Amino acid sequence: MKREDLKNCTFLDETIKSLIIPIEKVAHVHLNNSLEHALLVLVKSGYTAIPVLDKDSKLNGVISKALILDSILGLERIELDRLHDFKVSDVMELKIATMEMKDTFAKALALSINNPFICMTDSNDSLKGILTRRSLLVYLNQELFQRKSLD
Ligand code: 4BW
């Protein structure tokens, strides 16, 4: 694609509101949940990593199967008993990719290079939903396909 073609990609400047999976459909856990509970939610939902919220629905981190397994890894075996010893807040990842509803598709695309999902928050840090790499790619594919068929 040439540089002048990129200028015509107006969708890059559009907001990403319509692509968001709303909070009601996002699997998540709370800060004080045990690691056992978090592992159950992760396994049952089938996701690798999910957001962590506090009691006011504010985004605090992300918990993953890998982080949980790492935290219960002993020298020679996986120590399952330790699932009760830790809370989600003890092992969650604090570095999270976040955006607000008003942000553009171009920003989301750039963030999705290193993040399978982006957390959509409001000005109070409350989680409103997530934007997945899949939904961005589906949208990008549609836009590019439409452009090609119009040429
Ligand atoms: O249960 C699933 N249903 C469907 N339709 N697809 C799934 C499912 N589980 C995984 N997938 C597919 C998706 O294409 O595998 C990709 C990687 O999943 P992940 O990361 O490693 O669990 C999925 O890609 P994606 O839709 O772009 O999602 C990227 C990441 O966003 C997921 C997961 O960490 C998170 N995620 C997606 N939907 C979520 C969610 N977290 C909580 N709740 C949701 N509803």
Image: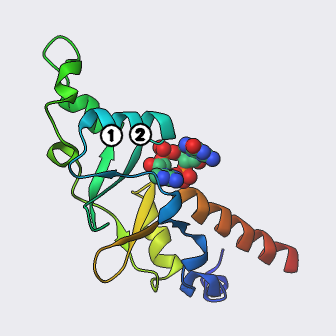
Q: Residues within 10 Å of mark 1 (few under 14, many from 20)?
A: many
Per the image, label 1 sits on a secondary structure element best described as: helix
x 57%, y 85%: residue: 14
Q: Which residue is mark 2?
A: 41
Q: Nearer the viewer, residue 31 or 106?
A: 31
- Horizontal side of 73 relative to 15 (left or right) equals left
Percent across and percent down for residue 56 are 27, 68
Quadrant position of residue 125: bottom left
Give the total of numbered labels.
2
Residue 22, visible in the rendered structure: yes
- Which residue is at the front of the view, 148 or 23? 23
Instruction: Determine the CA span between mark 2 and mark 1.
Output: 5 Å
Q: Is label 1's Cβ within 8 Å of ligand 1?
A: no
Query: Dots 2 and 1: beta carbons under 8 Å?
Result: yes
Circle 2 sits in a helix, a strand or a loop, which is it?
helix
- Residue at 53% across, 58% down: 25
The type of colouring in the image is rainbow
* Label 2 CB-ligand 1 distance < 8 A: no
| Image quarter in which the C terminus is found | bottom right
Q: Is residue 148 left or right of residue 43?
A: right
**Who's the residue at 65% across and 68% down the image?**
140
Residue 34 percent location from the top left of the image: 23, 38
Quick check: 70 above or below 137? above
Where is residue 124 shown, x and y percent of the image? 28, 80
Query: What is the three-letter code of the residue carrying label 2?
Result: Val
Which residue carries the number 1 mark? 38
- Three-letter code for the amino acid on which mark 1 is drawn: Ala
The quadrant of the picture occupied by the N terminus is: bottom right
On screen, residue 118 above or below 10: above
- Residue 7, placed above or below residue 24: below
